Amino acid sequence: MIKIKNKFSIGEMSKLHNTTIKTLRYYDEIGLLKPIQIDENNGYRYYSTEQFEQLNTINYLKDLGFSLGEIKVHLEHRNIDDFLELLEKQKELTENKIRELQRINNRFQSRIEDIQHARRIRELGIAIIKDIKERKIARLLETISSEPELEISLRRLENMSNMHSSVFIGGVGLTIDSRQIKNEKFDEYNSIFILVDKDDIRNEFVTTLPQGKYACIYYRGNHSDSPEYYKILLSYIKENGLQIIGDSIERTIIDDYISKNKEDYLTELQIPVI
C-alpha cells in the first residue's frame, strides 16, 4: 500500500474544489482523474495535493467548453500543439456564440424600441403615408384563414427557417393579396412572415418587403378588427388618387400576450402605393 503524507478523502477533495462527489467518482470510472489510493478494506478513495492541479485543469477546460473526452486526450498526451489547436477551436465556437447572442440582443433592443414607439402613437384610425425602407423577412406563402392556422403556419415557418422564438419576438406579420384587398376581402391571408436582421438566416424562405411609399394606419385591436381599418385605408387611397401596387402588410405590435388591457393593443396596416 502506498503511504501518503497529504491524503484527502473524496469528500474533502469535493469541498476543496467545489466539485460533487458524484462527479469525482465518474472521473475515476472514465479514467480522467483516478484517486492516488483506494482503501482495500472499505473502498474509500483518497487524493493528494499532487492531483489538485490536475483537477483545476479539468475544471478550467470544462469551463472553456471542452468535452471530457477532449480533456482526457490532452491530459494523456499533453502536447502543446494539440492544446493550441483545441484552444483555437474553442475560441471560434465562443466567437460564434457571441455573434449569436449579439443578434438576439439586437432583436430584444428592436422590440423594446418598437413597443416604446407604439406607446407614443396618438394618431389612431387615421390614414397616413410613410416612406419605408426595405425590410428583410423570412416568408411562408400559404393560405391562413383562422387563428389556429396562423399559429400552425408560424411554427412551420420557424422550423423550416431554423429560427427560434427569441430571434423573431414581436416581428411576426401577415399579408393579404392585393387583389383581395381591392375586392375588400380581408378574411384570408396569403402569407406569414418574420422580420429578420441581415445575418439572422440565409435560406430559400428569405425575401424582402420592398422600399417605397405605404398607406398606413394604426388602431387599437388585433387581426380580427382589421376590416374596418382596411376600408379607411382604401377610401384614403382612392381619395388621393393612389394605386395599390402590392400585398398589404399587417402586424400586431401589442396584443394580449403583452397586456391584459385592450386599450394597449396596437396593430398597424400597410399597403404599398404609388
Image (cartoon, rainbow, N blue to C red):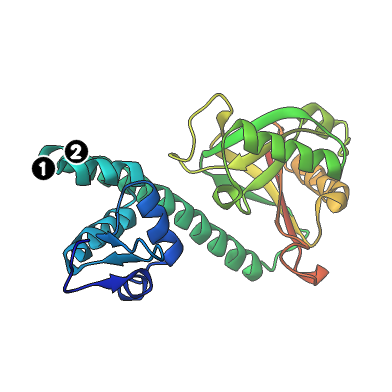
The picture quadrant where one finds residue 44 is bottom left
In front: 173, or 53? 53
Mark number for residue 98? Answer: none
Q: Would you name the residue on which mark 2 appears?
A: 85
Q: Going 29% across and 54% down the picture, which residue do you hit?
A: 33
Q: Going 31% across and 47% down the picture, which residue do you hit?
A: 95
Q: Would you name the residue on which mark 1 appears?
A: 80
> Around disc 1, counting alpha carbons within 10 Å, would you say few (fewer than 14), some (14 to 19), or many (20 or more)?
few
> Around disc 2, counting alpha carbons within 10 Å, would you say few (fewer than 14), some (14 to 19), or many (20 or more)?
few
Q: Going 27% across and 59% down the picture, which residue do you hit?
A: 60
The picture quadrant where one finds residue 59 is bottom left
Question: Residue 145 in the image: x percent, y percent?
Answer: 87, 36
Looking at the rendering, in which quadrant would you find the C terminus?
top right
Of mark 2 and mark 1, the one earlier in the sequence is 1
Question: Residue 207 in the image: x percent, y percent?
Answer: 56, 30
Any part of residue 218 in sight: yes
Question: Residue 6 in the image: x percent, y percent?
Answer: 18, 74
Q: Amino acid at mark 2?
A: Glu
In front: 93, or 212? 93
Q: Closer to the camera: disc 2 or disc 1?
A: 1
**Secondary structure beneath label 1:** helix
In front: 165, or 110? 165
Q: Going 58% across and 33% down the picture, which residue do you hit?
A: 161
Query: With respect to residue 84, does 204 lie above or below?
Result: above
Query: With respect to residue 212, does 21 lie above or below?
Result: below
Q: Amino acid at mark 1?
A: Ile
